[in-house]
Structure formats: C-alpha cells, structure tokens
Image (cartoon, grey):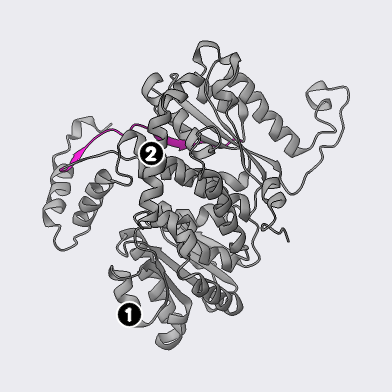
Amino acid sequence: MPDYRRRATREAMSLRFDFSGCFAAELAEQAVPRAAIEALASRLVTAHQQIQAREEAGELPVFSWLHRREGLAEVRELAEAVRQQFQTLVVVGTGGTALAVQALVRAQETRTRVVFADSIDPDCFGALIEQLDLSTTAFNVISKSGETPETLAQFLVVRDLLLRQLGAVDYAQHLVVTTDADQGALRQIVHDEGFRSLPIPPGVSDRLAAISPASLFPAAVSGMRIDDILAGAAWMEARCREPDVWRNPALLLAAVLYWASVERNVRTWVFVPFCHNLEALAQWSAELVGELLANGGGNGRLQSSPLHAWWIRSADPTLLAQVLLGSARDTFAVPLAVQDHGREWPVASAYQDLEPLAYLGGHGLADILAAGRRALETLLVHHRRWFVSAAWPQVNPFTLGQWVYGLQRTVFYLAELFGIQPGAEEAGDACRRLLYGALGRKGFEAQGMEVERYVAERPSEWVL
C-alpha cells in the first residue's frame, strides 16, 4: 500500500497540468500572453484570499469538511456492516449528489458490487431491479434536499418491493438514506421509520458532495481506500494554498479560463477523458461547472452563464478533432491523460503485407490511446486552439481526491473572478416547480395549470 505520508510518494502520484497548449509559441498570436496573466495578479490574489477567508470562517464547508471530517467514523462503521451483510449495494439517486458518488466509484474496480440506479426510465430501472436478489441487496438512497422527485419515486418503488418480499420487520435493514442532516422529507422518514442514515454536511450540496459522507460511504462499501481519497484532496489543497498563480494549478487554470472568456469570448469548456474509468468523472466535472457557474440574475431573472461545460468520449480521436475544430473558436479543451492504466494489452503482429494492420503490431492498446491524445493535441496547437492537459500517473483514490478538490477550487476561483454566487440555480428551481405542478404536488397548482395550458395550446400545425 502506498504511504502518502511520505512526500516522495505524494509527488510521484501528483496530477500534473500542462499549460503549453495555452502559452506555447506555436500558438502565435492566439497564445495566452504571460503579461495578461501577470496583469490579473491583484485580482487573482484577492480571489484566493477571499476563498481562504470564507473557508476559515466556515462559509465553505465543501473545503473545510476535509479538516473536520464529521461523520467519517460513522461512514466506516456503516460501510463495514453493509459489506458484511450484503453482496450488492444499489445507489439510488438521479441528482447531482448521486453523480458525485459515481464519479468516484466508477473510476475503480470494486470488491463489493456497487451499481447505480441513476435513471427513472422504466426500461433501465426495471431491468436493474428485476435482476437483483433483494435478500442480499442494500439500497443507498441519496438526495441532499430529500425532495428530488425522481429519487423519491425510485425510493417508493424499492421500499414497496422490499416490504412485500421481506416483510415489515426486515425491510428497513436494506435501506441506507443519505440526506440533509436536519430537514427534508427523507430526514423525516428516517426519524419515523428508523432507517440507517448518513448526513450530508450543511452547505455541501449536489455535485459538491464528492468528498463528503455522501460519496465516501458507497466508495468504502466498494472497497476503495477512502483515506487515500482524503489524502489526495489534502495534497491538492496544499498545492492550492500557494497565492502565486504560477505555482497554484487551480488558480492558473482559473486565470487562463477567465482571460480566454473575457478577452477571446471562450464560452465552452470541454473535458476529454482518454480513459474509460474517467468518463463518469468527466461528466461530473462538466456538470459541476454548469451547476456552480449558473448565473442567476436574481428576482427570478435568468442570465447566461459565462462558461458552459460538456464532456466527450475519447474513443474516436478523429471525431474529437472534428467536433473541437469544426466549431467556433470559443472552446477550451481539457484532455485527461492516464500514464499507467494498470494493465496493457499487446497488439499481435500479423498481416505484414497489409500496412493498415502491419504498423499496429507491437503496440499496446494503452499506447494507441496515448498516441491518439498526442495526435489530437498536436492538431489543436496547429490550429491554434487552447487546451490544458491533465496528466494522471494512475487512476486511484489518491489521484481522484486531487482532481475533485482541484476542480472545485478552480470553479470557486472562477466564480470570484466573474462575480458569481456559486450555485445560483434559478433555472433549475423554476423547472422543479413546474415539475411539481405537473405531477400534482399540493401548493404548486398554478405551475400545474401553466404546464397544462402550454400543452393544450401548443399549435398542432407544427407537428409533422
């Protein structure tokens, strides 16, 4: 087992961010001027100090929980009990908190089977439920608010099945609820029915819950070393304590993105994982940017966010090139590159008379994947498009902790620079109220009538 108390071990497993895709001379007039970043120095220092001050004042529990770690002993104890009692853990949830869990667990091979019920599509959810042996399955229902309609609907389906198959005495042992510590419908049900539960720390919501009991419990059940996740986050925190932008990777990434947005009208941030195990993490990363930089205008007004984000699979580098270069020059790419995949699969040499096959012999699959990334980055530089490569020594709990903490820090820096209150989800709240009304929730009758009116008045002439 790696000993991350040793600095040499931490250094060997450090994520490295290569900014040459922004500053290289080959980018010519499109290169980010070093002087432009220097000119932002005072604003960057202010943003850094404001986040530090808010963290020390307890206003940013997403960062301060790393030091307090309330509930961590409870996470370990409950995870061990579930691992001993059950063969499968199903994580039930469609919200951002559940996605944060997937970002960690899907990046690692697990000892205990952990699966995700992250869709209410009846084909998908029904197929999953029907293959389970409920007597050996536990369900972890996750919702920060305790009122996510899709998650609560899944909970009601699962609870009914457990009651009917296992009985009113035993069924409760198969449910673990992760929700707000003090409020919400799920917290009330926990109090009333005695389900085992874990609290999501106050102020830690949705996709920010990747380093919290919400994510660490399923990770611990799966067999991941959660101490290594926390050690990785702490190591990245130490690197981000540096106020000098040229020594703080999260601050430099924020500075480059801010400059590109303001001065070059960059609007889109694309995460490109060159590793299957990082795809859920890339999705979480894109949604984290969307959630925290959503620019609510206040008083019910909706405004455009300064940066949007999405992710794309790296299975076909030629398609990636077409997507990234076939659009306007408003895209900033972040390839996620893994140096050691943990295994290699050699490509056999054959058909030496057919060059389209012959040249592949002697390579490995990971080698071909890495070559595709290098080819894409070369093309991006040639066409003077910006990117920052994130190099992962391995995909393991320590590097996952680094990425999660570092990206969260970057987005909070960006929010300070743009003058945004992170997480102002006015569009999401508006949609949620309409959903409540459409489903007949009391208190949202007006919203329900609004949906019905729209459906009834939709012109049929436009339906082909």
Please give left or right for residue 463 compared with residue 358 in the image.
left
**Left or right placement of residue 183 versus residue 412 in this view:** left
> Please, is residue 66 above or below residue 43 in the view?
below
Q: Is residue 359 above or below residue 239?
A: above
| 10 Å crowding of disc 2: few (<14), some (14-19), many (20+) | many
- Where does the image place residue 320, in percent across and percent down from the top left? 56, 28
**Can residue 39 be seen in this snapshot?**
yes
Residue at the image position 25 percent from the left and 50 percent from the top: 429
Q: Which amino acid does label 1 sit on?
A: His
Q: What label does residue 262 carry, if any?
A: none
Residue at 13 percent of width and 61 percent of height = 443
Q: Does the magenta stretch include residue 308?
A: yes
* Residue at image mark 2: 47
Q: Residue at point 50% right, 35% down?
A: 244
Q: Give the range drawn in magenta.
A: 299-314
Residue 80 occupies which quadrant of the picture? bottom right
Q: Disc 1 designates what residue?
A: 191
> Mark 1 to mark 2: distance in Å?
41 Å
| x then y, percent, for residue 455 | 18, 44
